[in-house]
Image: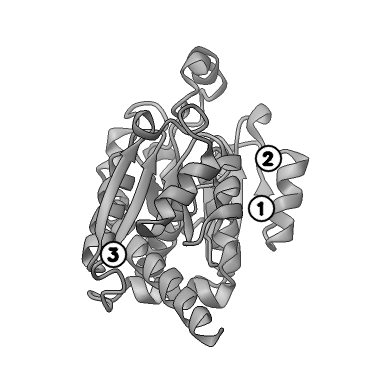
Amino acid sequence: MNHFLEIDDLTPTELRSVLALAQRAELPPVLAGRGAALVFEKPSARTRNATEMAVVQLGGHPITIRNDEIGLDVRESVEDVTRTLGCFHAVLAARVFSHRTLERMTTVSNVPVVNLLSDVAHPMQALADLLTIQQEFGDLQGRSLAWIGDTNNVCRSLTIGASMLGMHVRVAPPPQYEFTDEELDRLALAGATPQTYARPEDAVAGADVVSTDTWVSMGQENEAGERHSDFEGYSVDDRLMGTAAPHAIFLHCLPAHRGEEVTDAVLDGAQSRVWRQAENRMHTARALLWFLLATSEQKEAVR
């Protein structure tokens, strides 16, 4: 079974294929007459809209399910919920608090499991980011990406995906928010060796792409005061963007906290690609789902 929990569940060749599929206006309706279960432990705007529309565009019927409706490990175990949903749907996609939940799903699922976000990874966002960068620059070999802020789940997936396509990744987090040794080992297994900089200006200097994320993610609200203090000086503003390459673009996975990790001038400015990036969540979701289902069915036919 083809599951997608992190972006390097695809090979570099497969990743390029998915990005090429995302450029197509239409794909064969591989989900015609079938359902897709979309489980959301966390609320969502872009992820839900992008994935539901991707399923519709593939001819399928999306069923969005909130955690209070199924109660993972409360009303039923993760494994039993997974088995149940596999009775009705051709694919199961989930936005969860713990990555372990997704791993447990894959052990019993008879349909592809897709990570819509976990505490460890956000590969669907990385796909949209890479498509946006590719639309801007074409071949990404040798291009540079600067990440400013927390080395979180979004950063990890984007670092892996960008490295798979030959980009140079630079990260500039506050000292206590750097990649751990364990995370660096995981990245290295995927062929990703990001450079870490103490100053955002050094990471951004001459970069083709500048990306960031909110300082306080969902579930970290109790750390807000400490994080705002720790991230002082890590805002992406006109001054910082001015040190990037003249043709550089700015990315943010959204939602953005204007005036914190990014200023209005950058988010709404000429270098910003955040709205195309948001739209690309739908195009890459459509391509990824088609790829997973088509290749799974091809393997089944061979058997």
87 or 55, nearer to the observer: 87
Label 3 vs label 2: CA separation? 41 Å
Left or right of residue 192: residue 53? left
Asked if marks 3 and 2 touch (Cβ < 8 Å), the reply is no
What is the number of callouts on the image? Answer: 3
Dot label at residue 194: 1
Q: Where is residue 299 in the image (x, y as percent from the top left)?
A: 53, 80
Quarter of the image with the C terminus is bottom right
Asked if marks 2 and 1 touch (Cβ < 8 Å), the reply is yes
Q: Position of residue 242 (x, y in %)?
A: 42, 46
Q: Nearer the viewer, mark 2 or mark 1?
A: 2
* N-terminal label among 3 and 2: 3
Tell me the element at label 3. loop
97 or 230, nearer to the observer: 97
Q: How crowded is mark 2: few (under 14 residues within 10 Å), some or many (20 or more)?
A: many
48 or 125, nearer to the observer: 48
Tell me the element at label 2. loop
Left or right of residue 90: residue 59? left
Height in image: 132 above or below 268? Answer: below
Q: Position of residue 2 (x, y in %)?
A: 53, 67
Height in image: 257 above or below 59? Answer: above
Q: What residue type is labelled 1?
A: Pro
Colouring rule applied to residues: one colour
Q: What residue type is labelled 2?
A: Phe
Left or right of residue 139: residue 179? right
* N-terminal label among 2 and 1: 2
Label 3 vs label 1: CA separation? 41 Å
Quarter of the image with the N terminus is bottom right
275 or 301, nearer to the observer: 301
Q: Name the residue under label 3.
A: 34
Q: Mark 2 points at which residue?
A: 179
Instruction: Report which quarter residue 55 is drawn in.
Output: bottom left
